[in-house]
Amino acid sequence: MTAADAGGRTTPEAIRARKGGAPVVCLTAYSYPFARLLDPHVDLLLVGDSVAMVQHGHPTTLGATMEMMILHGQAVMRGSQRACVVVDMPAGSYEGSPQQALASARRIVAETGCQAVKLEGGAGMEPQIAAIVAAGIPVMGHIGLLPQSVEKDGGYTIKGGTADAVAALLADAEAVERAGAFSFVIEGTMDPVAAEITRRAAIPTVGIGASAMCDGQILVIDDAVGLTVDRVPKFVKEYADLRGVVAEAARHYAAEVRARSFPGPEHVFLPKDSQAS
Ligand code: KIV
């Protein structure tokens, strides 16, 4: 059962209303077939800027562009009917000013039809979030480990290990909520900090590498189904081994082509008279 069971797509407002209720189930999606497969099972599909890494082979999410996010957002919208679809704003498309953020958010919504946008940053991005929300576009926040800032931060470091870091995270969460976000992602923090942020926030938190106490969870779909070809992070649980399935299918196909046993008689087209004889 998902929040869309009453019919239609799950709205950001319906996600907001889940605070403290049934956990919000989220996954990333980047393509039409995956959107079709995941849509019946989740409340929210995030077209994450992780697409730049997992689908396009960039070393970080900084490789994502507006065009990339819009193209994948359109595919996910075509493949889904029920989930709330949120599209990530790529690095460089919103940090400059609230005006820049609003123009980019408007373009993403106009060209994909998605329900909401997501952007990274807490207190520093409060004006950007507020401007987008004021224009009627729902925003999902993202605090904690911010993949778009890894170069600046010197790598993927878990947040919330010192009293100062905890205070900064609590302030970020308050700012995102005050700006009007309907929910926010907490990524890569100490578990007790994510639990405390969740306890204090009036809107749902969605954890990744955070805490089971968050109001919802999200995983990158390639990680969740075992498609990740490089390093699998500690916070990931692989629910399937698609790496193995795909590699075995390719090996089997290659062997049959080399042995001329594929295509078989059932896969080819023969003229009617030769079928009858
Ligand atoms: O881009 C992404 O996949 C994300 C999730 C990790 C939350 O932002």
Image (spheres, grey):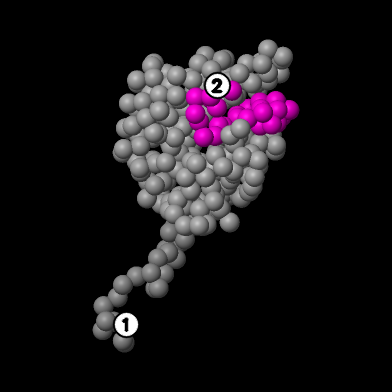
Residue at (47% x, 35% y) in the render: 48
In this picture, residue 137 sits left or right of residue 59: left
User: Marks 1 and 2: in contact by CB < 8 Å?
Assistant: no
Image quadrant occupied by the C terminus: bottom left
Magenta span: 174-201
Image quadrant occupied by the N terminus: bottom right
Residue 213: percent from the left, percent from the top? 70, 37
- Asked whether 85 falls inside the magenta stretch, the response is no
Report the front residue among 35 and 236.
35
Query: What whole-number distance in Å separates the C-alpha atoms at marks 2 and 1?
Result: 72 Å
Please give the residue where the numbered disc 1 appears in the rendered image.
275
Q: Is residue 209 above or below residue 245?
A: above
Residue 252: percent from the left, percent from the top? 51, 57
- Confirm or reject: label 2 Cβ below 8 Å from ligand 1: no
Q: Nearer the viewer, mark 2 or mark 1?
A: 2
User: What amino acid type is highlighted by mark number 2?
Assistant: Ala
Please report whichever mark, 2 or 1, sits nearer to the chain's N-terminal start.
2
Please identify the quarter of the rendering in which residue 134 is found.
top left
In this picture, residue 239 sits left or right of residue 120: right
Residue at (69% x, 31% y) in the render: 199
Residue 183: percent from the left, percent from the top? 54, 34
Please give the residue where the numbered disc 2 appears in the rendered image.
175
Report the front residue among 234 and 91.
91
Tell me, yes or no, if residue 160 can be seen here.
Answer: yes
User: What amino acid type is highlighted by mark number 1?
Assistant: Gln
